[in-house]
Image (spheres, rainbow, N blue to C red):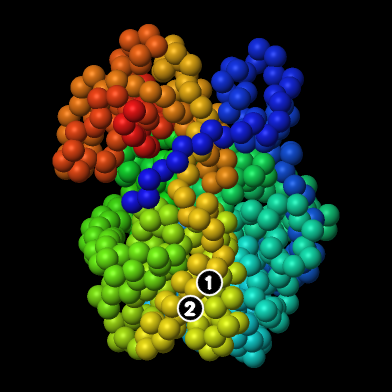
Amino acid sequence: MSKLQLRRRPLLGEPAGWGDSLHPLLQRIYAARGVFSPEQAEHRLNRMLSPQQLGGMQQAVDLLAQAIGDEASIMIAGDYDCDGATGTAVAVRGLRLLGARRVDYTVPNRFVHGYGLTPELVASLPDHVQLIVTVDNGVASVAGVAAARARGMRVIVTDHHLPGEYLPAADAIVNPNLHGDGFPSKALAGVGVMFYVLLALRAHLREQGRFGENAAPDLSVLLDLVALGTVADLVPLDFNNRVLVEAGMKRLRSGRGCAGITALIEASQRNVATLCTSDLGYAVGPRLNAAGRLEDMRLGVESLLTDDARQARHYAELLSSINQERRELQATMVAEAEIMVAQAARVDDRVVGVSLFEPSWHAGVVGLVASKLKERLHRPVIAFAPAAEDDPDHLRGSARSIAGFHIRDALAAVDAQHPGLIERFGGHAMAAGLSLRAQDYPRFATAFDAIASEWLSEEQLQAVLYTDGEMPAGLFTLDMARMLRYAGPWGQAFPEPVFENRFECFSWKQMGEKHLRMSLRDPRDAALYDAVMFNAYDGTPPPSMLRAAYELTINDWQGRESPRLLLRYIEAV
């Protein structure tokens, strides 16, 4: 594991206008994240960007309004991750609220249909489908859209992934990341794009008088789904996304979330009333994702569409069971990957772009393996597995990257230098997927490492943990922990506060097999603080004097809350 370098997060400007309304510590934390005034922290829904600013919106809305008026058969084509599942549920629920009578959905099975709106997925659709609406996919589905159009189906693509060299010949494309799209926020998740389409559609139907004397349907009931998908997909939480997520979190905390999410929260032993974004990202989202990784994401979508609490609990139990299976499989695969890396390092420790392949690995879990190894090595990592049990000649890879290395652009560079080496690829700056022939894996691994070695500097290969500096003495309180917990929403590109201080390790004990529990003394005032560090015990006692990077969290044990330090990194001083 790379040694971390702790750096203090610089202030991006001076706080102004807060007065006594906000604690000075939180003013400092906000200023380090580009928030300087109360207006920039007011996450009101009326401050959302306008849906009309999204390119392609009017064409999409016209098609949907016509389909609703004609009672046409609409098929939502989703994706098999949490963003895709929540986006599919938002599309189905929202279109029904807006008057669509014939709405169904399909989700590709990654082992049968591949990713996105593929020709194989289109071939599986019934003949009566008249309009396909993709969610969280489609911008790269050139062949799939062509197959749908050849069957007489119209296609609306809603997506947020980066486009390839060619766009599909869809009837409408709504994607903030299309070249030339002037939408100010490029960070919308797939579920967010779909929610925006529904907002624009509702405004269009209202102008047409479709709702008569009745009030237009309340689409805010979908915001819990939007929040879950946005957080789980790790898109940057810019102001617009924070507005969406905060509104969804408020619905959930007030007990107004949909039955499916509520059941998943309870199954993960989280408290609805005190829910925070990390609960969605680390407990709820993985349970949904597990269905798409190991089984069929229809199970996840059905859990989000039911309004029956008992049925929702049944789905949550099934998803939790699948997630446990995923955790066990992932642990085995990560251990094997670490052995591979250690053996390779003994031969050549200069590899920058890391590729890993094991014939026994599961294609649905390689992304998690890549993510774990990326964190430990601070290198871009691509993990591969056979595309299917009966197709060992083709591999599917999942890539995870580090700051400063655009993984999709790197794959595009490999593709340009070695035409035909990669069969398909797509994704974001930090995550991507690809497929290639098994016989070409060695050549790809060499080409990918060459690009990574060329693009990444020594400085970029140094793992850095940014902190918010020292926590002042006397502020390690439950009130401060609560304030920090709800001051977000925290997430990608708007990170939870991390502090760094020097402590004396007053006492410690092993917790489970790999965890540490410590009592840390603050040398400034001799106060003792409870602290935990997960996956940190290797048989070596912690140093007696240490520098720690940590989050101030709340330990809820049998209904009693107390402040606790969640250690992210320690080093001897």
Q: Position of residue 326 (x, y in %)?
A: 29, 60
Work out whether 30 lies above or below 269: above
- Residue at x 72%, y 48% (from the top left corner): 216
The amino acid beneath tag 2 is Ala
- Residue at x 67%, y 48% (from the top left corner): 217
Residue 451 - label: 1
Residue 154 vs residue 334, the one in the foreground: 334
The amino acid beneath tag 1 is Ile
- Marks counted in the figure total 2
What residue is disc 2 on?
447
Work out whether 100 lies above or below 308: below
Residue 420 - label: none
Residue 215 vs residue 355, the one in the foreground: 355
Q: Are marks 2 and 1 in contact (CB under 8 Å)?
A: yes
Q: Position of residue 448 (x, y in %)?
A: 48, 74
Q: Position of residue 157 (x, y in %)?
A: 65, 71
